[in-house]
Amino acid sequence: MRHLLTTKGLDRDTAIGILDVAEEMAEASARTVKKLPTLRGKTVVNLFFEDSTRTRISFEAAAKRLSADVINFAAKGSSVSKGESLKDTAQTLAAIGADAVVIRHPASGAPTVLARSGWIDAGIINAGDGTHEHPTQALLDAFTIRRRLHGDASRGKGLDGVTVTIVGDIVHSRVARSNVWLLTALGAVITLIAPATLLPIGVGHWPVAVGHSLDRALETNPDVVMMLRIQSERMQASFFPNAREYSRQWGLDDERMARLYPTTIVMHPGPINRGLEISSAAADSAQSTVLEQVTNGVSVRMAVLYLLLSGEREGLA
Amino acid sequence: MPPRTVLQQTDITRALTRISHEILESNRGPEKLVILGIPTRGVILADRIAGMISDFSGQNVPVGSIDVTLFRDDLAQNPTRSPAPTRIPAGGIDGKTVVLVDDVLFSGRTIRAALDAVGAIGRPHSVRLAVLIDRGHRELPIRPDFVGKNLPSALGERINVRLVESDGDEFVTIEESA
Amino acid sequence: MSATILVKAAILVDGTRADILVSEGVIVKIGSGLSMPAGTSGAVTVIDGNGLTALPGLVDLHTHLREPGSEQSETILSGSRAAAIGGFTAVHAMANTSPVADTAGVVEQVMSLGDAAGYTTVRPVGAVTAGLAGLRLAEIGAMANSRARVRVFSDDGKCVSDALLMRRALEYVKTFDGVIAQHAQEPRLTEGAQMNEGTLSGQLGLAGWPAVAEESIIARDVLLAQHVGARLHVCHVSTAGSVDVIRWAKARGIRVTAEVTPHHLLLTEDLALNYDARFKVNPPLRRSEDVRALRNGLADGTIDIIATDHAPHPSEDKDCEWGAAAFGMVGLETALSVVHAAVVHTGHLSWTDVARVMSRVPAEIGRVPGYEFGIEIGAPANFTLYDSSVSRVFDTTMLHGKGQNSPYLASALPGQIIATIHRGYPTVLDGKLLSPEELAPYAGVNRG
């Protein structure tokens, strides 16, 4: 693998391959000595143009467990915000000798631009770009679902026939996009639930079912309910009237939680708005995978770093 | 030159039988033994050796696998490999005698990686090495404790080990590398 | 210094072959077997027109020359050179400069710089509203009555979105036989917009620029134009729906004209797939259905003209993430080749039609005299010779403005301008631009 920019176009075998490597990483992380020497001498730069402590820490832990050197470059509030271009930053990182760049950027497509620019030769990992994609989040979600369903027998398996309902701000969600492409490639059946204002134009062409009623979606007893974070600025922009109406219609509250099958998995990419898109009880329940997702995130990111940085440098994939 | 067969299935079975006996003898019994195979074919051989030792001694010998991919020092020189599962028997390896099993011993780099992998899992009393073929050309100060067959080879030659469990048939050949 | 030019055996747009003799800035003879008149003095040029199509000088109603204010992107000189190599003998320089072309002083300066450069006639476009701020009218009368005699007014880059202000502007320019060229983009519907709104924008996570944001403004404006009996020109029409609205308006007798850019006739939104900002333009590239509708609208006369919307940008404004990149692409150098590929090759337009939509009608809309009859005895000598038989892989050496933001780099395009005659003297010969020094003697005389 040369870069990880999107999950769109990732085929089933490649995706399962990544998840299987992540299984080994998870297993290694359970050992007495968690550190692996695998990426000794490699330099991983976390290039964050947007604050995201959670994602940055997860990548940092992943790189360090593989013995890579980690440089954290919080581009926000640095020379970059004083007008330095992505190009200048990339060339600087190339000069430092970065082998991989983990990039979080508010502009959709920035990692793609970096990967095909020629400014830097490093492998590029998209850690969330604008409203486009967040591939490692989708991979860790898939990993989490697979583990919940198959436990130690997960290796080699897809998510065939697993029903996943994704609820909330689809139009602005890079997590939703990456999950739609990845989980579909793995065989899952996806339903998106949101008010029409929060569904992207053209969603009818996506490989998903679309609905507006969370209650009706829950009646089908999906295997997984994934709640997305709602940002308060959406209310100002008239995507919906206010928080109360949103959570009444599309929030996973205690009453809806009680109606779920006991085996239904409740997921949230975090950070959570407790009481808005999900109630505290739902987020903290045994069905919730919120913390597992964090743990699994490290394993999945180790797998991605390993697959990008080990092996001979291939040509542009 | 066509490949030359150096071990038939019966030779392999005889070699493994002898190795199993030698392991038992050198450890004065199976009590503290843990047999760990190195993927892929080392795992098969480890299973067979553990089975034989159990048969000979009447005691169950713990067996598992230890993947060394993430500990290799030549990852950048080869295409990306996917790590295989590591399965450590329930009793762990602390204080045990770990016998690493691989099919062919060559440069010694795999075994070096395996020693690091063992160290990440626990602290055995000692670590021994059993291989089906020792073809020479060591690059590190590593030597096997139990050898099925010493097979002096030229650097350019290829040794092919085929086992029923993984390949459907069973023999060892040597051939000129293409 | 006066120039005498004899073009031998060129192909006129009607398909006939003829020699063209130019003297003292005017086409003096068209016929076969012409020779240099005896006793010709001054500069004499004979051009072998064999196999070349002679088109009347192209007129661009929509060019960004960036001067004054953004000379790092383009100057009137560099943009004029790009125009000449593209076969253009007149361009309309949009008003969104710094300072904005909203006073007589600025438009006269732009015109003078164009004359001094000497490669093409530069006709300034005046701003509709002061500072393009969309709040109150610019000094339209002063610009119309200035030496620049401005007839086209546009806030291009911004939409005159206030309905009342648009009504007033349409009414007011009637006084001066002017026209409002509207950049039709409803601003609220396009806040933060990055590309055509559709399935692809949803996938790429780029904020959408919906077709309705263009169509709703055009619908409003044609009704306003009808109501006040004014002329309206719609810039860079980009959607199938817009073509329908304009067709409807024309059927009602509303005095509306419309332009389409070469890039909207050829390129589609899927080029955004790799976030290569060379393909970021406003209005955005649309779907293939839209491209088809635009070609058909041009063929049936619903769309009147082709205009380049030549929009040069320095490399740093394109060599970046899509969201941060500037909108626009250069287009003067490639316009005729792209039109050739997109609508001539496909049978939508003949070369006679090309002369109409790229020369006569844009000149008529802009009230540029001298283009009424095309290549005709007695007409000012503005024409270009095009070799339609060649195909070239387009590269930066073929760009002569300052901008390198062409979407066609590394693409094969048909045709090449071999010669351009502007005001009776050559600006391009043998496919090469003449240098400013070579032009100086002619430009001096013709500046008057």
Image (cartoon, helix red, strand yellow):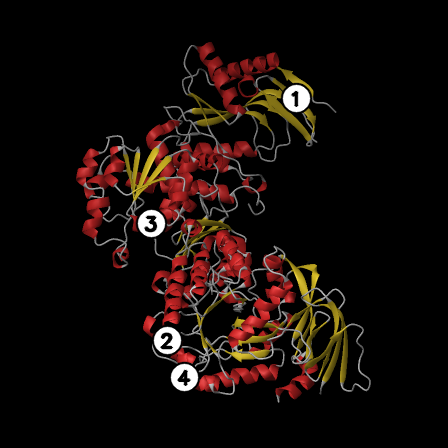
Q: Which residue is mark 2?
A: C133
How far is disc 4 from disc 1 in space, using C-alphas? 93 Å
Q: Which residue is mark 4?
A: C139
How far is disc 3 from disc 4 in space, using C-alphas? 56 Å
Res. C266 image quadrant = bottom right
Chain for disc number 1:
B
Q: If you read the primary sequence from the N terminus, does the residue marked by circle 2 or circle 4 appear first?
A: 2
Direction from residue B53 to residue C374 in the image, left or right: right
Q: Is residue A168 above or below residue C253?
A: above
Tag 1: residue type?
Thr
Q: Are marks 4 and 1 in contact (CB under 8 Å)?
A: no
Q: Which residue is mark 3?
A: A54
Tag 2: residue type?
Ala
Residue at 46 percent of width and 29 percent of height: B66
Direction from residue A35 to residue C425 in the image, left or right: right
Report the front residue among A183 and C220. C220
